[in-house]
């Protein structure tokens, strides 16, 4: 499998807009881990207040905290592999911790402090309202600054589709995860990336991603760790549509 896609999709099925019931979402996640989808999957994403409801064999979980000092409930069915918190330093040192900062608030000084604290960055790229989707300019500035500052990041919301597009139902302008992968590569090479994020030509963007060699792919994923998606099928369908997977792994 292309290393660009390994463990790229964090399973956020219990969050909007899909909002699956927790037992169903956990069962589906475990089933995917036993299928050909396993190499594509990151951890299951769960809010701290729902951790205690997870039962069965241990599941790798990225825990979303409402505040940095929120305690994480111990549960033998949960293996905590990451912490996601609002714009504050989480008080957990055993696993990677992501601090969520709005794209408009990103600058080099702030990310230098984040890196010095040993934290990663979480960027929100969508949501249930149009204003939750950052513009290409804002996202480009945030990604560029993260790459140049040596900060690892994850994205969340609005990235089910691989290519930048306008949703015909909501009218929201969605970013594409292939656009972000390619933009990260080009930021590493020193290129301006706003045009890459805005590109809606799927074949062109996919060709650019396919042209990333293994060395550059490793550098890209050193920065772009993963993104949370409430659907695993939709991004997989997108990779198949642009012939970026050799076969359907399901």
Image (cartoon, rainbow, N blue to C red):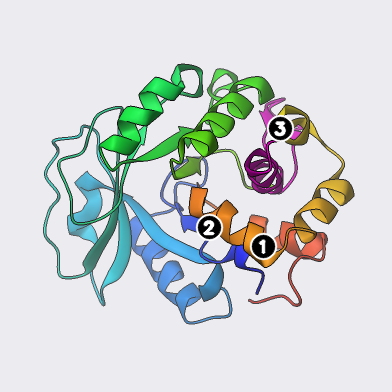
Q: Nearer the viewer, residue 195 or 49?
A: 195
Quarter holding the N terminus is: bottom right
Residue 25: x, y in percent?
41, 61
Q: Which residues are magenta?
A: 162-190
Which image quadrant is residue 174 in?
Answer: top right
First along the sequence among labels 3 and 1: 3
Residue 230 colored in magenta in the image:
no
Residue at x 47%, y 82% (from the top left corner): 34
Q: Are marks 3 and 1 in contact (CB under 8 Å)?
A: no
Residue occupying the point 21% across, 70% down: 77
Q: Position of residue 96 (x, y in %)?
A: 30, 52
Q: Taking 78 as reference, is 95 above or below it?
A: above
Asked whether disc 2 touches disc 1, contact meaning CB atoms under 8 Å apart, the reply is: yes
Q: Residue 9's mark? A: 2
Mark toward the viewer: 2 or 3: 3
> Camera-side residue: 27 or 155?
155
Q: Which residue is mark 1?
A: 236
- Describe residue 214's horizontal placement relative to residue 29 as left or right: right
Q: CA distance from mark 2 to mark 1?
A: 9 Å
**Mark sitting earlier along the chain (2/1):** 2
Image side of residue 131 versus residue 212, left or right: left
């Amino acid at each position: 499998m292309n290393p660009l896609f390994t463990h790229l999709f964090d399973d956020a099925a219990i969050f909007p807009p899909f909002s699956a019931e927790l037992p169903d979402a956990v069962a589906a996640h475990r089933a995917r881990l036993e299928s050909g989808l396993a190499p594509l999957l990151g951890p299951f994403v769960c809010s701290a207040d729902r951790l205690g409801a997870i039962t069965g064999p241990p599941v790798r979980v990225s825990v979303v905290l409402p505040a940095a000092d929120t305690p994480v409930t111990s549960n033998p069915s949960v293996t905590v592999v990451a912490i996601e918190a609002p714009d504050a330093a989480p008080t957990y040192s055993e696993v990677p911790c992501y601090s969520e900062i709005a794209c408009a608030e990103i600058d080099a000084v702030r990310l230098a402090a984040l890196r010095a604290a040993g934290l990663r960055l979480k960027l929100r790229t969508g949501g249930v309202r149009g204003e939750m989707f950052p513009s290409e300019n804002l996202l480009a500035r945030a990604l560029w600054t993260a790459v140049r500052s040596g900060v690892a990041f994850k994205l969340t919301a609005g990235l089910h589709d691989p290519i930048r597009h306008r949703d015909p139902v909501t009218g929201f302008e969605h970013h594409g995860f292939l656009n972000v992968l390619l933009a990260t590569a080009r930021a590493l090479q020193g290129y301006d990336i706003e045009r890459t994020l805005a590109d809606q030509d799927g074949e062109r963007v996919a060709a650019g991603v396919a042209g990333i060699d293994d060395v550059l792919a490793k550098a890209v994923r050193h920065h772009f760790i993963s993104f949370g998606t409430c659907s695993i099928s939709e991004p997989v369908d997108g990779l198949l549509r642009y012939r970026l997977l050799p076969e359907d792994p399901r």
